[in-house]
Amino acid sequence: MIRRAVPILLTLGILVAFASTLFFLYKKSEARPVVYQTVKASPRDIVKKTVAPGAIVPRREVVIKPRVSGVIEKLVVQPGDYIKEKALIARIQIIPDVVSLNNAEAGVKSAQISFDNAKKELERFQKLWDQKLISETDFNQHQVGFDLRRQELESAENNLQLVKDGASRKSGKVSNLVHSTVEGMVLEVPVKEGGSVIEANNFNEGTTIAAIADMNDMIFQGRVDESEVGRLKEGMPVTISVGALGEQSFQGKLEYISPKGIAKEGTIEFEVKASIQLKPGVFIRANYSANADIILDRREKVLAIDESIVKFERGKAFVEIETQPQAFDRRELKLGLSDGIFVEVLSGLEATSRLKKQETGGDGASKKWGAK
């Protein structure tokens, strides 16, 4: 009996295991039901904007250049100093040109000879005038001649001193001292004591001694792509964010749009400038990198939906609205302003409507979602 029962039990076990395997495979092959996530429209602000990269710069930056060539003998200021108008910046030691020095010395000698001769003539005619041997007219002519020769000598001496030292004690002219032409902060001093500088003239722009600017009057200077510039207008509000200041941002207005584009890396870009409303106690350094959000259009507290759930066909927009749990009907919408993420709904949707939103897993199968 036992020998007969063992094969029977073994056969029954195999059949049960085989049936269990078939049942498991059947259950696993069954398609999982798709549960769609639903979302609702909500009131929100829609802002259409374009971003312009650029930098914060002073509205007016003045570069100071010397009026004579020579060597920097003394620098009085350094970057970061706040100076008044006409404040001394540097003193230049003039290295005179040999030809100019020789001409100036020759001019002094020639003027000295003329002056000595005029002096002798005046002394001789003074004696004749005292003896009443000449008329007053003749004496006055020689007096005028003497005065002219004396003036020529003084002018020649002043010219020689200017060529040699850059300053004239008699005339009070000092050309080797560099003064500021504006009031503001010194941004940079690109020269050092002992360095050579060249004067500004018709053939050379000269060496920059210092750059000075009013740091209380800053502007944003940036660029926008040609695809965006057509929608910009002067006076548009601008929000400027400075990376070096973290989350802090500044408000301003668009002041300037360049009429000419510049080719850069295969695209055409246009320069824009915007004013900045500085905040008390916040110091902005020149050439801070910044981004300007130029607001093209705005809608406040309007009914909006996620633009990713909208389907477009033949120029029309559609969404699927839940009529019953996990049952949806297609409905056409009229849309308004979009910020790239959310879009304004003008008509075709109620605030209480629930809209279908489906996501697909990486294996191509639908991913289960719980209803919101």
Image: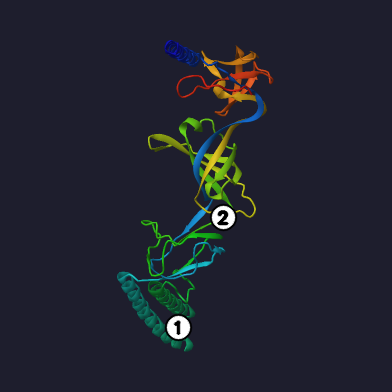
CA neighbours of label 2 inside 10 A, class few (<14), some (14 to 19), many (20+): many
Task: Give the residue type at disc 1.
Answer: Ile
Image coords of residue 178 (percent x, y): 47, 66
Image coords of residue 343 (percent x, y): 59, 25
Q: Secondary structure at mark 1?
A: loop
Residue 182 visible in the displayed image:
no
Image coords of residue 299 (percent x, y): 64, 29
Q: Secondary structure at mark 2?
A: loop
Q: Which residue is mark 2?
A: 215
Horizontal side, residue 254 vs residue 129: left or right: right
Pick the residue in front: 364 or 208: 364
Residue lying at the far front of the rendered structure: 1
* Vertical order, 129 against 232 (above or below): below
Task: Give the residue type at disc 2.
Answer: Met
Horizontal side, residue 146 vs residue 347: left or right: left
Pick the residue in front: 196 or 236: 236
* Vertical order, 121 against 198 (above or below): below
Pick the residue in front: 137 or 214: 214
Residue at x-position 51% and y-position 44%: 221
Checking the image for residue 134, the label placed there is 1
Image coords of residue 350 (percent x, y): 68, 18
On-image quarter of the N terminus: top left
> Can you tell which of label 1 and label 2 is closer to the viewer?
2
CA neighbours of label 1 inside 10 A, class few (<14), some (14 to 19), many (20+): some
Whether label 1 touches label 2, CB < 8 Å: no
Alpha-carbon span between mark 1 and mark 2? 72 Å
On-image quarter of the C terminus: top right
Occupied quadrant, residue 335:
top right
Residue at x-position 65% and y-position 53%: 280
* Vertical order, 20 against 122 (above or below): above
N-terminal-most mark, 1 or 2: 1
